[in-house]
Image (cartoon, rainbow, N blue to C red):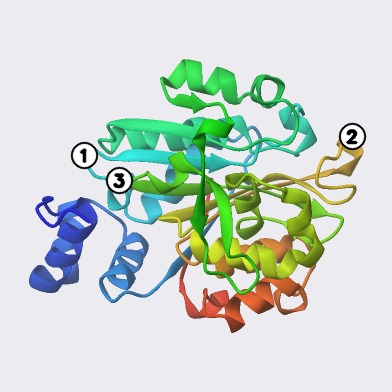
Amino acid sequence: MNFDKPLTRRESIKKLLQLGGSLGLAGAIGGSLQTLKVANAASENKKFIIEGIGQTEGYSVRALTRKVFESAGGAGRFVSKGDVVVIKPNISWARRPELAATTNPEVLAAVIELCQEGGAKKVRIADHTINDARRCFALSGAAAVAKNTGADLIHPRSSLMKKMSLKGNRLDTWPVFVPLVEADVLINLPVAKHHSLSRLTIGMKNWIGAVGGSRYSLHQDIHQSIVDLAHFFRPTVTLIDAVRIMTRNGPSGGSTSYVTEKNTLILSDDPVAGDARAAMLFNHQPQNLGFIRMAQEQGLGTFDFQKLAQQKVVL
């Protein structure tokens, strides 16, 4: 950690909250009272969860993404000038966006733009795909997003994998996709979908795409593997893409008949709470999912997301 680094905007907001009071800060950052409540929660080290819902016909996914971040205090709460931001979407499969096997490219584009506006020096997209990376990037729309936004699209390769100590209950030393641990800001950007073994793959399971090695063996004790990886990769924030969710035959899918439109985004700095709220979109009780229950038991967060500073925004 660089102790000579100037205060980030997030730290500055905390200072202002402590020194100037809530009403003064509300005027300073131009936020709504609801946004201020989330900022106050941050000053008290209280976790937050924000749910964005697109209700109007033809709503803009990019606009909804922006509104969700604005409600959390803006991208500048998480990104400081000069930061290297790495975004970890789920683009493991060579599938078109409408099949909901991969992160929505409109959400990805909006997050990149917000980070750039927040002063990021570089924004990188990184995922260790299962299918051929070039096909995954092309069909999912990630390659076009990178080209249009100027973000770096990192192709996975062995030279970017380094063995690291995960110190997990099950996983000890494992090859890690280096760009993800070199980031100043790490944003988890999963798509919510069905999984044949873990029942769901949302935020915490997205970290299986952040490592190399024999990933098949991670599925032999999948719930503990998910939690071990989630303990190692601590994102700055997680934005769950539930614009379209895959409700069966996951995680790869392959038919629009498996897809349901939920038009929802969930932003949280508690990875367990985010997954718990998303699980309810599939009519699952969070505590009944092994990886969510274990993550709470092992101190990673809470599945009782109602204890967090909550906000719902509608577009």
| Residue kind at label 2, given as amino acid type | Ser
| Residue kind at label 1, given as amino acid type | Lys
User: Can you give x and y, in whole percent of width and height, for residue 217 in the image?
Assistant: 77, 56
Q: Nearer the viewer, mark 1 or mark 2?
A: 1
Which quadrant of the structure image shows residue 27? Answer: bottom left
- The foreground one among 154 and 164 is 164
Q: Name the residue under label 3.
A: 79
Could you tell me which secondary element the residue under label 1 belongs to?
A: loop
Q: Mark 1 points at which residue?
A: 81
Q: Name the residue under label 2.
A: 255
Cα–Cα span, label 1 and label 2: 42 Å
Locate residue 216 relative to residue 47 in the image: left or right.
Answer: right
Could you tell me which secondary element the residue under label 2 belongs to?
A: loop
Would you place residue 88 above or below residue 78 in this image?
A: above
> Pointers 1 and 2 in contact (CB under 8 A)?
no
Which quadrant of the structure image shows residue 224? Answer: bottom right
Labels in figure, total = 3
